[in-house]
Amino acid sequence: MPGPLEGIRVVDMTQVVAGPVACMLLSDLGADVIKVEPPAFGDLTRLAQFAKGGLNSSVVNNNRGKRSIQVDLQQDAGRDLVLDLIKDADVVVQNMRPGVMERLGVGWEGSSAVNPEIIYCSMSGYGATGPYADRAVYDPIIQAMAGYVALQVNPQVPIPDLVRNGVVDKAAAWMAALAITSALHARHEGKGGQHIELSMLDIAVQFLWPDGGMADTMLDPDIPRGYRLSELYTLSQCADGHLVYFVISDGQFHGLFTALGHEEWIETWGTAAQRAGRQEQLGGLLGNAFLDWNVGELLPRMHEHSVPCGHVNQMEDLPSDPQIVHSETFIEWEHPTAGRIRSPRMSAKFSATPPEFKASAPLLNEHVDEVLAEIGITTEQRQALLDAGVIKTDP
C-alpha cells in the first residue's frame, strides 16, 4: 500500500542531511517527493567519492524514494519553473541560510503567492533572526552549542566528546516531518497553508532537555540538584569486552549483585539510602566484579535477573542481530546502476495504511523529463529551458 501520505506532493529544496532526511521520511510515509537540485553537482552529498553507478551511500541514505530534477534558480525561468512545481504541490522544504530562498523568489512569500494552501518549511541553524542567524553551521557545531558535547563525558575518562553521528541533523529531520504532517492536518481542518520555521539549535535543546536538562529544570533554591542521566550511564569493562547496563531501582541493583555472584552485597548496598553518597565506593566494587566475567557469560545472568543491559554491537553486527532480523528492520534491494543496497525500513508500523518500501534512489536529474511533463511543459518550452541552461537532460 502507498502509505498514509498518499497524494501529498513535496518539493524538496534541501541538501546534506537534516532537510533531505525529513523529506525522505515523508516519502517513506507515501508522499511523492521531487528533489530540486542546483546545477553542476547537485546536492553536496553527491560529491562523496565512495560511489558506484552514480550513487553513494550518503545520497541513498538521505534521499531514497525521491525523484530528482536539476534547475538553475539563478535564472528567472528557473524560478518560474519551480513556482510551477509549487503550484501543484502540498509541501515545500528548504534548508538554505536565511534570506537565500527569498532572494531567489521561491521563499515563503513567493511560494504562498502562487499556492496559498502550501505548507512551507524553512530549516536553518539558528532561525531567521538573531545574533547567530547568518552563521554557517553543521551538526557538530550545534552539538557543541546545545550542550551535547559537554555531556559526552565518561567518568573514567573525563574528556568531553562529540556524539559521533549527526544526532541533531536527524532530530531536526524528525521534527520537520512531525511539524509538516501536523500542518497538513491543520490545512485539512480548513486552516489553510502556513510557514513553519525550524532552528536546529532550538530543536537540539528541546531534544536534549527531557534527560540532559534534569539538573537544570527545577529552579527553586530549596530543591536539591538532581542527577543528569549522563552521569548514571555506565559502559562496563568485562574480561573480554564491554557491555552497557542501567540500574535505578533497589530491585534492579539486587538483580545486578546476584548476577555478578555477589548476592551478599544486597545486605550492605541494597537500598537507595545505603548507596547514597557512596557511589564511588560501590562503583569500584562493581568495576572489579565485571572483570571476573566474559560478556557472553554475564549477559544471560543479567537478563535472567531482569537487569537492563545489552552487548555492544558493532555496526556490521546490526543486520544479523536476532531482534533486528526478527523485526525485518533492514531491507536489501537492487539498484539498476549502484547494485545491492541495504536500507532500514520506515520504523513505524501502520495497521490500516502500511507504507510501501520505495526501493529506489535518484540519480542526479534522473526524472527531469517526467516531472516537466507532469506540470505541462511542452516540447518547445523544454527545449527553450534546455538551450538557456535552466535545465539539463542528461542524468
Image (cartoon, rainbow, N blue to C red):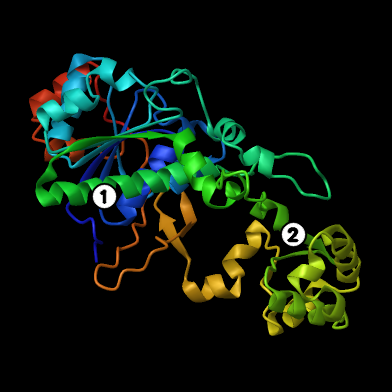
x and y percentages locating residue 31 in the rendered image: 25, 51
On the question of residue 173 being in view, the answer is yes
Q: With 304 as the anchor, is 138 left or right in this view?
A: left
x and y percentages locating residue 247 in the rendered image: 70, 69
Query: Separation of disc 1 and disc 2 at Cα?
Result: 37 Å
Dot label at residue 192:
none
Can you tell which quarter of the image residue 3 is in? Answer: bottom left
Is residue 195 or residue 209 the one in the foreground?
209
Q: Amino acid at mark 1?
A: Ser
Rendered residue at 66%/72% (across/down): 308
* The C terminus lies in quadrant: top left
Rendered residue at 51%/40% (across/down): 205
Q: Which residue is mark 2?
A: 234
* The N terminus lies in quadrant: bottom left
Dot label at residue 182:
1
x and y percentages locating residue 374 in the rendered image: 13, 40
Above or below for 76 versus 86: above
